[in-house]
Amino acid sequence: MQAAPTWDPQQYLRHSTHRTRPFLDLLARIPDLPGGNSPRIADIGCGPGNVTALLADRWPSARITGFDSSREMLAAAEHYAGPTAGGGSLDFRRADAAQWVPGETFDLIVSNAALQWVPGHADRFPDWLDRVAPGGALAFQVPGNFTAPSHALLAELCESPRWRHRLNGHGRRYVHILSPADYLERLTELGCEAVDVWESTYVQLLQGEDPVLDWTTGTALRPVLTALEDDPSASSEFVGQYRDLLRKAYPAGPHGTVFPFRRIFAVARTAQEPRA
């Protein structure tokens, strides 16, 4: 059995500006919530908590709980825990999205760049929507760039003769997303009153030496680094080979390195309560 990847919150946050922008775009499309002045919100796969805290900017009095399976990420997220400036609260709990069943009703269940790590996550939608209040929402965004060179080259390298005996499958292990049309169909069939699904490609200009490698070191490369963590020499060799491939695929330009990144978004609102 493959071990779950070990996460590095500081490495993940090195590109926090680019990583946060899709969440802000998602947040802007979420409708008003039914929870009055203090909506109840769950953030699935909250990571280091920096985007979870942004929910309190939109809903200052909200009671927000972030859930994540990584102890490292939760430890970093505790920085944001406690009362919020608008009179709400923010706390964090350990939970695996693959098994998480809401223990209470939420006005919003949201997830930012996390569900791609969860096999069969769309099969969890019925349980989650059952615990979304009438007129509430399920909203998420996932990366849609797994055919891009950054990820395709990683998968090919893992499956190469040099590495397949140790890493075969690691490069594609967490590619568990559906097409935008599939998400639309799934959520509509579950009886949501309104479903908004879209995709955007962010053409990002990254700075620094080997910035695409630096980006993937915080995300896609984590399973490989975890698998090789007991063999520093092999880890260094693999990263060096991957770096060379990325340099050819994403050459540095006079203003930085262009790194296109496709994202898929969905906002599904549950049906309103029947009128008396």
Image: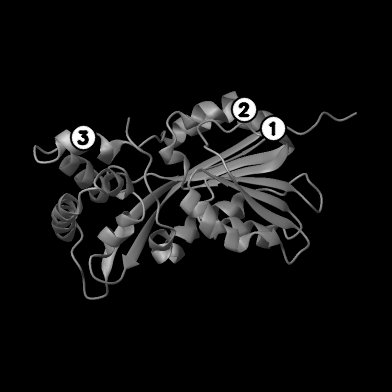
109 relative to 135 in the view: left or right = left
Image quarter hosting the N terminus: top left
Task: Indicate which disc residue 131 carries.
Answer: 1
What secondary structure is found at the residue carrying circle 1?
A: loop
Say which residue label 3 marks. 168
**Residue at the spot 73% in from the left edge and 67% down from the top edge:** 85
- Other-residue count near label 3 (Cα within 10 Å), few / some / many at <14 / 14–19 / ≥20: some
Looking at this rendering, what residue extends furthest in the right direction? 276
Place of residue 122 in the rendered image (x, y in percent of width and height, measured from the top left): 50, 30
| Measured Cα–Cα span from mark 1 to mark 3 | 38 Å
| Residues under numbered marks 2 and 1 in contact, where contact means CB atoms less than 8 Å apart | yes
Q: Residue furthest front?
A: 230
Quadrant position of residue 42: top right
Residues under numbered marks 1 and 3 in contact, where contact means CB atoms less than 8 Å apart: no
Q: Amino acid at mark 3?
A: Asn
Where is mark 2, residue-wise?
Answer: 127
C-alpha distance separating marks 2 and 3: 33 Å
**What SS does tag 3 mark?**
loop
The spot of residue 176 in percent (x, y) is: 39, 34
Residue 128 spot, x, y in % from top left:
62, 32
* Outermost residue toward the top in this view: 189
Mark 1 vs mark 3: give the one in front: 3
Looking at numbered disc 2 in the image, what kind of residue is underneath it? Asp
Q: In which quadrant will I find the C terminus?
A: top right
Q: What residue appears at the point 23 percent right and 70 percent down from the top-left corner?
A: 209
Q: Is residue 24 visible?
A: no
